Image: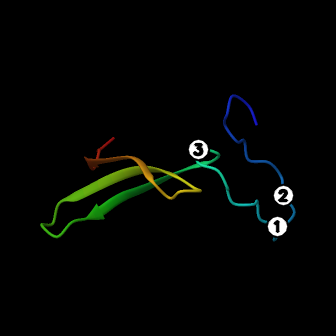
Amino acid sequence: MQAGVSIPGARAVGTKRPRATEVHQRWQVDAVSQQQLADGTTACWLTASDEASRALLEGSVFPLCQF
């Protein structure tokens, strides 16, 4: 772990890391890209949640960006 960020490393196949047991021990960030909404528009969103409490820490929805 460096600066509070977990850096993925080599793990034996089939092994799982233990789930967080304390609030703010580990956060999860999830992204959804190019999701079509009911009105036909396309959007993306990003959420950050606490693994132990499953509380939503932040959520952002934004239009699809064309690069």
Compare marks 2 and 3 and give the one earlier in the sequence: 2
> Which of pointers 3 and 1 indicates the residue nearer the eye?
3
Q: What amino acid is found at the position of numbered circle 2 in the picture?
A: Arg
Q: Using a 10 Å C-alpha cutoff, classify the residue at mark 2 as few (fewer than 14 neighbours), some (14 to 19) or many (20 or more).
A: few
**SS label for mark 3:** loop
Mark 3 and mark 1: Cα distance apart in space:
23 Å
Nearer the observer, 41 or 20? 20
User: Residue 42 placed where, x, y %?
Assistant: 23, 59
Q: How many marks?
A: 3
For disc 3, the marked residue is 24
Residues at marks 3 and 1 touching, judged by CB atoms closer than 8 Å:
no
Label 1, residues with CA under 10 Å away: few <14, some 14-19, many ≥20: few
Q: Where 32 falls versus 13 (above or below)?
A: above
The three-letter code of the residue at mark 1 reads: Thr
In the rendered structure, which amino acid carries the disc numbered 3?
Answer: His
Circle 2/circle 1 CB separation < 8 Å: yes
Furthest-left residue in this view: 39
Callout 2: SS: loop
Q: Does residue 46 appear left or right of residue 4 in this picture?
A: left
35 with respect to 13 (left or right): left
Q: CA distance from mark 2 to mark 3?
A: 23 Å
Q: Please state the horizontal and vertical placement of residue 49, each as a whole percent of the image.
A: 48, 52
Q: Residue at x 84, y 57 (%)?
A: 11
For this view, does 30 lie left or right of residue 3?
A: left
Task: Tell me what residue is drawn at x 81 percent, y 71 percent.
Answer: 14
Residue for badge 1: 15
- State which tag comes first along the sequence, 3 or 1: 1
Say which mark, if any, is on residue 11: 2
State the image coordinates of residue 59 (x, y, percent, origin top left). Answer: 35, 48
